[in-house]
Image: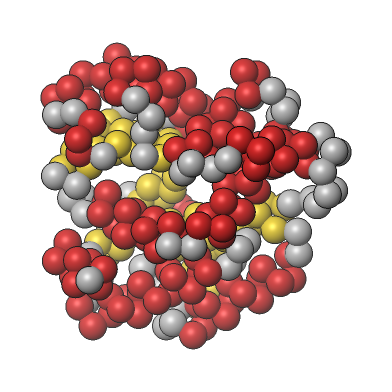
Amino acid sequence: MAGHSQFKNIMYRKGAQDAKRSKLFSRLAREVTVAAREGLPDADKNPRLRTAIANARAENMPKDNIQRAISRATGDGDGVQYEEIRYEGYGPDGVAMIVETLTDNRNRTAAEVRSAFSKHAGSLGETGSVAFLFDRMGEILFVPETGTADEILEGAIEAGAQDVESSDTGHVIVCDPADLSDVREALEGRFGPPANAQLAWRPQTTVTVEEGSVPVLMKLLEALEESDDVQQVSANYEVPDELLERLDA
């Protein structure tokens, strides 16, 4: 999602997740567990874990929940093993979509993702079928009140970011994936905790969705995010702000 409506698109979908707090905590906990298992269970030595914990704290996830998620990775928890699986396909109006999941049952997850696409004018493709249309980047999101566009730009340059997109709906700082943790920490030291920080698939070009297809696309996104196994959905759509506002209302 590029252009002026990027932050609003992200926050529209984030709001839908926040309405179901326990599900949001479950997703955050899975990311913490996988990050701790992939590297060391020490946040000081594991950039992915640092970012996962920071995102969990930004959503006011209790410390006990975060510690339990780390314990699962060290063998002190319930022993559940999560697998990272990526799905790719197209939604209404040819919107390219990447669905990232963490699952302990790949058959269940595949069935849920396939069902969401088929019920909402989408088609699931092979791995790699749309990824070439995106760039893998780090994204750090700040709300508008964090600072002016010039202040954010200055801070982002000093932190080593590559680009900044500012509008009346917020600030999106873009950086190299390997630098995400360092850039986030530098910006947090200057502006306070961000609304979110994540690795994201950023589209090289966008598709403008026809008005009649927007509700179908949003239903597809919501159906995917209803799955406990889905961590993140990236898509190259562009939707006018006023349409999103009407849907949100």
Q: Is residue 130 above or below residue 111?
A: above
Choose top left, top right, bottom left or bottom right for residue 220.
bottom left
Its colouring scheme is secondary structure
Q: Is residue 212 above or below residue 38?
A: below
User: Residue at coordinates 56% horizontally, 58% vertically from top-left?
Assistant: 22
User: Residue at coordinates 15% horizontally, 30% vertically from top-left?
Assistant: 149
Q: Position of residue 45 (x, y in %)?
A: 65, 19
Q: Position of residue 212 (x, y in %)?
A: 23, 83
User: Residue at coordinates 58% horizontally, 68% vertically from top-left?
Assistant: 227
Task: Please indicate whether residue 247 sits to the left or right of residue 236 in the image.
Answer: left
Question: Which one is nearer the viewer's eye here, 65 or 72?
Answer: 65
Q: Position of residue 89 (x, y in %)?
A: 49, 68
The quarter in which the N terminus is drawn is bottom left
Question: Which one is nearer the viewer's eye here, 32 or 119?
Answer: 32
User: Residue at coordinates 36% horizontally, 58% vertically from top-left?
Assistant: 15
Q: Position of residue 217 (x, y in %)?
A: 36, 74
Choose top left, top right, bottom left or bottom right for residue 41.
top right
Task: Please indicate whether residue 220 sits to the left or right of residue 78 in the image.
Answer: left
Task: Please indicate whether residue 40 sits to the left or right of residue 55 in the image.
Answer: right
The quarter in which the C terminus is drawn is bottom left
Question: Is residue 210 visible to the viewer in this orientation of the structure?
Answer: yes
Q: Is residue 52 above or below residue 96?
A: above
Task: Please indicate whether residue 22 sits to the left or right of residue 236 in the image.
Answer: right
Question: Is residue 128 visible to the viewer in this orientation of the structure?
Answer: no
